[in-house]
Amino acid sequence: MNRGLKIAFLTVLLIGSQISSFAQCAMCKAVLESNMQSGEEAVGQGINEGIIYIMFVPYILLAVVGYFLYKHYQKTSDSPSA
């Protein structure tokens, strides 16, 4: 696969993953509204944990990509240039 095709594939993949995350926000609202109507004690505890997980995913992905970029550039700088 050439580089342009890989970038296009990853772009489509990342854009497609955004659709499911927007759907989760609607689900969070629905769960909170139903919990408030039923009068449960810990209305937002589960939702807050879910928000924390969703919030950390981009940072974890950036850290992984940064690590691989660092290793790639470290490897290329160590190789002797002709």
Image (tube, helix red, strand yellow):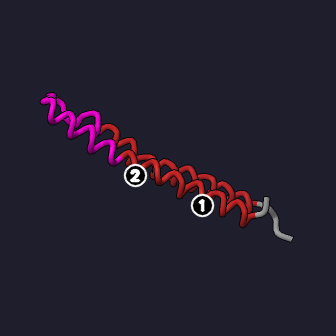
Q: Amino acid at mark 2?
A: Phe
Residue at image point 60% right, 58% down: 12
Front-most of 57 and 35?
35
For the magenta stretch, what is the residue range?
25-48
Q: Quadrant of the C terminus?
A: bottom right
Q: Is residue 46 left or right of residue 81?
A: left
Residue that label 2 marks: 22
Q: Is residue 52 left or right of residue 40?
A: right
Residue that label 1 marks: 11
- Give the answer, above or below, for where 56 lies relative to 81: above
- Give the answer, above or below, for where 48 lies relative to 1: above
x%, y% of residue 61? 52, 50
Identify the image quadrant of residue 73.
Answer: bottom right
| Secondary structure predominantly adopted by residues drawn in magenta | helix
In the picture as drawn, the residue positioned furthest to the right comes out as 82
Q: Is residue 38 left or right of residue 9?
A: left
Q: Answer yes or no: do the residues labelled 2 and 1 have beta carbons within 8 Å?
A: no
Front-most of 43 and 48?
43
Q: Amino acid at mark 1?
A: Thr
Residue at image point 66% right, 58% down: 9
Residue at image point 18% right, 30% down: 42
> Nearer the N terminus, badge 2 or badge 1?
1
x%, y% of residue 24? 38, 45
In the picture as drawn, the residue positioned furthest to the bottom comes out as 82
Residue 50 lies in the magenta-colored region: no
Residue 38 lies in the magenta-colored region: yes
Front-most of 51 and 30?
30
